Amino acid sequence: MIEGFVVDLGGTKTAAARVVADRIGDRLQAPTDGQAGLEAQLDAMAALLDRLGYRAGQPLGVAVAGRVDAAGRWHAVNAGTLERIAGEPLLDRLRARFGPEIALRNDAAAAALAEARLGAGRGAERFAYLTVSTGVGGGVVLDGRLLASRDGLAGHIGFVSSSLGDDPCGSGRHGTVESVAAGRAIARVAGTPDARAAFAATTPRAAAAIDRSARAIARLCADLRTIFGLDRIAIGGSVGLAEGYLPRVTNYLAEEPALFRVELVPAALGQDSALLGALLPDGVER
């Protein structure tokens, strides 16, 4: 059972909450300043935690967008978010400011672990969580253990190649799944202000943008099934859980040979997944 305080710092918003008996209690959030440096980001976390009654030394889990290496250094991996985060000593600064009881990991990895143990992945031995939102990310949990790497890159599955496009990606690569399937890509192709507007539109252009995204995600799921032998993938995120999106992905996955199909389910924990996963015991393979 997990209890304590948690922070989820994403590319657009930062949330903080108290966790009681594996459940989110009081919760607050504020916009993330993508141009802020490390100390300003820590100040923003502290302001939310203070309002929740957190006191230094209490258990604290922190999940952040970007890459967290084995030394606890924080690296932005998308040029469009967290512009001043480049190898910052986040874990050391968290401990200096809040005390030694700190758990730190990437936000999508935290969400994957929470879904595996508390949500849609329960009962699956080989499981992946895939978030389709402003970007595309996720994590892989094999036999209950989160797959990770010393450089923190493992699990950034949105940065693998897609045959459906060759546009530049914020990662520095071209033709990635994120550059094709993420909310930003949907809006660009649909000609709408954002992905939400694309889903609300009834134009052929918007439908094509959403279909292109869903096809790319279906191919990614088949690839993950091939590499890891997965038996279930949960899909979350604002795009992934949008009405009608998962059925599209499921239909495109059905076009793959039977061997490469995998059970697809909606993520069960919603916006709480990264918060809960931030405090879960590590159990990481390196």
Image (cartoon, rainbow, N blue to C red):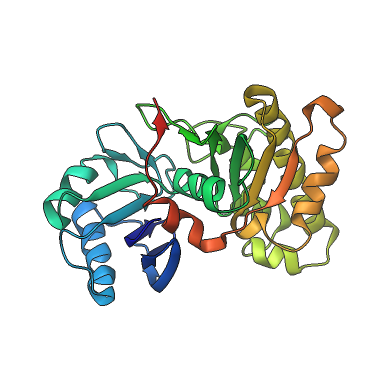
| Side (left or right) of 70 relative to 108 | left
Q: Is residue 69 visible?
A: yes
Q: Give the percent coordinates (x, y) of residue 183.
A: 62, 54
User: In the depicted view, which residue is nearer to us: 224 or 194?
Assistant: 224
| Side (left or right) of 172 relative to 60 | right
At horizontal 14% and vertical 53% (from top left) the residue drawn is: 99
Q: Give the percent coordinates (x, y) of residue 262.
A: 75, 36
At horizontal 61% and vertical 60% (from top left) the residue drawn is: 238
User: In the depicted view, which residue is nearer to us: 240 or 129?
Assistant: 129
Instruction: Name which quarter of the figure residue 261 lies in.
Output: top right
Instruction: Name which quarter of the figure residue 187 lies in.
Output: bottom right
In the rendered image, the quadrant that contains the C terminus is top left
At horizontal 81% and vertical 56% (from top left) the residue drawn is: 207
Q: Give the percent coordinates (x, y) of residue 139.
A: 52, 39
**Is 106 placed above or below 245 here?**
above
Q: Is residue 11 visible?
A: no
At horizontal 28% and vertical 74% (from top left) the residue drawn is: 52
**Is 250 placed above or below 267 here?**
above
In the rendered image, the quadrant that contains the N terminus is bottom left
